[in-house]
Amino acid sequence: MIQDSTERNFIRAAMAAPYLERDEEQALAVSWRDRRDQESLNRITVAHMRLVISMATKFRNYGLPVGDLIQEGHVGLMEAAARFEPERDVRFSTYATWWIRASMQDYILRNWSIVRGGTSSAQKALFFNLRRLRARLAAGNDTLSNATMYQEIATALGVAEADVANMDSRLSAPDSSLNAPLSADPDSMERMDFLVCDDPLPDEVVCETIDIERRSTWLRDALGALNPRELRIIEERRLKDDGATLAELGDAMGISKERVRQLEARALEKLKVALVARNPEFMAA
């Protein structure tokens, strides 16, 4: 109650603040820019708080406290005051409007949903214009299908139709926790229980990792039984994704492809003997 009363008093005081004439506004802006006169900055911001309040009411339908929107808009107003260039002969209210709106929109995007969205300028425009465009299209044609509506909105905003459909579904329903029960029953299943994952189970991943490391160790030990020429053939022919052909390897080594085949067969036999010597169960298998 105290907070509501304080907020009302603040809004009442802001709306009662006197307007600034163009010449007075320019003089205050120059004073703040050149001399960093805090009193000049205060008079500029107080005179334009009604602009912040007016814009905050336009964003009240996003379910966030108007007081928070006003605070964020004040941040944008201060940013505008810091960047304003009086010599451009533009009214401060015109310049500040963009900064105030941008600050409020960023706040809404950060707090409207636990799922972050609207990170690009196109997505941001979609978020803040989808409801307005949808209402306008629906008012002109009651029989307009969603597909046609999404196509027209996508064309108007320069985004993909899939993005329009996705944003529309997000705006039409609140966030839901995956751990929320499906009914009032305390033993009820959660939404998470119905999510299907095709990835291997953790214990399967661990077992596969251990098996791969064990086989790699066995292979490295067995390769030690080969001479340099046999090792090169096995590496070039068997241990690379794009294995060399017999002819290519023969040309590189200065031997015939038949000789490469013979050396490869002998090397494979040596590997088999080395692996079985270390792991007799291979022979049983």
Image (tube, helix red, strand yellow):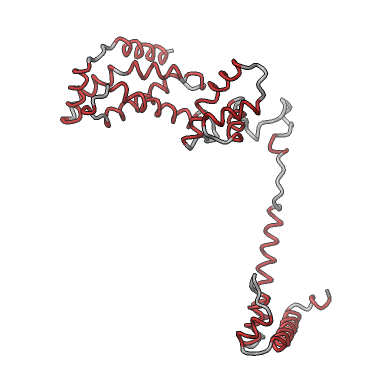
**Residue depicted at x 60% and y 26%:** 174
- Count the numbered circles shown: 0
Specify whether 213 is left or right of 88.
right
Residue 183 or residue 34, whichever sits in front: 34
Residue 197, compared with residue 187, is above or below; it is: below
The residue sitting at 20% across, 28% down in the picture is 87
Q: Position of residue 17 (x, y in %)?
A: 28, 12
Where is residue 10 drawn, in percent x and y?
34, 14
Q: Nearer the viewer, residue 24 or 90?
A: 90
Residue 30 vertical position relative to residue 215 in the rendered view, above or below: above
Q: Position of residue 32 (x, y in %)?
A: 20, 27
Image point 71% across, 29% down: which residue? 182
Left or right of 218? Residue 17 is left
Q: Position of residue 61 (x, y in %)?
A: 51, 19
Along the horizontal axis of the image, is 85 left or right of 94?
Answer: left
- Which residue is more in the foreground, 44 or 23? 23
Q: Quadrant of the C terminus?
A: bottom right
Q: Is 265 rendered above or below residue 66?
A: below
Residue 89: quadrant of the picture: top left
Residue 250 lies in quadrant: bottom right
State the residue at coordinates (44%, 12%).
Answer: 1
